[in-house]
Amino acid sequence: MYKILTLNNIALAGLERLPRDRYEVASEFQHPDAILVRSHAMHGMALPDTLKAVGRAGAGVNNIPVAELSQRGIPVFNAPGANANAVKELVIAGMLLGARNIVQSWDFARGLEGDDETLHRQTEAGKKNFAGFELPGRTLGVVGLGAIGVKVANAALALGMNVVGFDPDITVQRAWQLSSQVQQATSVDDLFARSDFITLHVPLVEGTRGLISAQRLRRMREEVVILNFSRQGIVDDEAMVEALDSGRAYAYICDFPTNLLKNHPRVVTLPHLGASTREAEENCAVMVVDQVRDYLENGNIHNSVNFPEVSMPRNGGVRLGIANANTPNMVGQISTALAEAGLNIIDMLNKSRGEVAYTLIDVDNEVSAAVLERIGAISGVLAVRLIPGTVPEHESEAR
Ligand SMILES: NC(=O)c1ccc[n+]([C@@H]2O[C@H](COP(=O)([O-])OP(=O)(O)OC[C@H]3O[C@@H](n4cnc5c(N)ncnc54)[C@H](O)[C@@H]3O)[C@@H](O)[C@H]2O)c1
Ligand SMILES: O=C(O)CC[C@@H](O)C(=O)O
């Protein structure tokens, strides 16, 4: 049986794809084969020796110790695009919340007291404080044109906005999806200078931490509205509050409440709701469960954030999955070990990504524990796994 540890609630639609005769799923396990996680902070967590894969039912992986897992030869999977529509819808809502002062005016309306005639008088006297502005003709700057950024950009065009985007590493797939009406900024600063609304759709990494800083806020357009549905840390919250207090920025809409932000009159904070729709939760769970299952059962890798794409059909034979450092002569040493054990290679695929390489090998006969051990002992081999054609009764791996 494969043991799957869940660190967050994972939608049933995904978990149901793990056959009960082959998988045990629980929120507590000593020796899991795989972990399914959403936003649970895994940094600092002791990683069990039995762990073979981590599946993130979502996009961002900043809560996962990806570098440490790579060093141990463990792929991390995510669900690219599976929650993008949910986030896009909330970003569009966020632009309207900001432009029309919806939260502030709703608070005002809820605070009204007296009979209905009094409320009517107060309403008509008070509404001038919440007058806003419309979206058509304004410019939205989209930083990060990945799964979410592209959807937001295209939707904003449909609302009559001008859209300018920046992503130095946009993929061909996303470029095809992006409307040709989206203008290209030459840099983040160029985008900031041209935008009335700025929305962030980049991962939190060292290069994006503090992307919106005091210095940059000073150079933005008057009354800019900033939306952060990416991650806390990409915007310098103190600088943001200063810009709002000075009247330079108009509103800040974000998905990450802090004590500094949550009661500020020009800030709307939502409780990390971007991906919280039934559809997005199910899409993410289904995608990531299928990927983790294909890895456990066949050694195939699809949508990993730290390993290459590797997929080989099962043609019979006995399969080995080997993660190793991306250095010369690894495949040579592995195939020598197999040949010296009298094993013939039926099929093989080797791919690399950055410092990590991964090899799938089908051989014509049973692989002994001694051979696994020998391959595991090759300098640079990170993990070796015998991938049974059927479900394993016992552990059969060497590291
Ligand atoms: N609020 C939520 O619930 C929620 C939900 C989903 C995703 N997110 C966050 O949104 C982020 C983006 O999600 P996605 O699905 O669009 O991811 P994605 O990987 O499809 O897109 C990210 C894009 O950002 C680009 N990028 C990276 N660094 C950049 C930089 N410095 N400048 C410009 N572009 C840069 C990449 O090239 C990529 O195209 C995630 O990493 C996650 O942190 C939040
Ligand atoms: O799982 C969630 O609810 C949030 C997910 C979101 O932050 C993501 O990065 O996909």
Image (cartoon, rainbow, N blue to C red):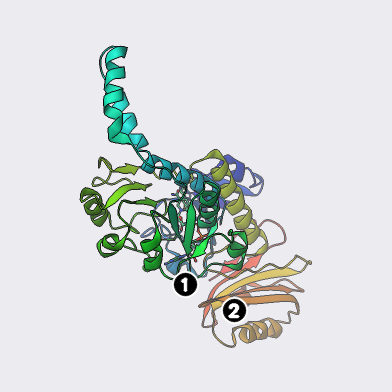
Q: Tell me the residue at 50%/44% (across/down).
A: 89
**Left or right: 355 as drawn, with respect to 102:** right
Label 1, label 2: how many angstroms apart (C-alpha)?
17 Å
Quick check: marks 1 and 2 in contact, CB under 8 Å?
no
Name the amino acid type tagged 1. Gln
User: Which residue in the rendered view is the most extreme toward the right?
Assistant: 315
Image vertical order of residue 248 relative to residue 319, above or below: above
The circle drawn on residue 71 is 1
Q: Give the labeled residue for mark 2.
A: 375
Q: Residue 145: x and y, percent? A: 51, 61
Name the amino acid type tagged 2. Ile
Label 2: how many residues lie within 10 Å, few (<14), some (14-19) or many (20+)? many
Front one among 45 and 181 = 181
- Badge nearest the viewer, 1 or 2: 1
**Left or right: 155 as drawn, with respect to 98:** right
Q: Tell me the residue at 41%/64% (across/down).
A: 191
Front one among 323 and 369 = 323
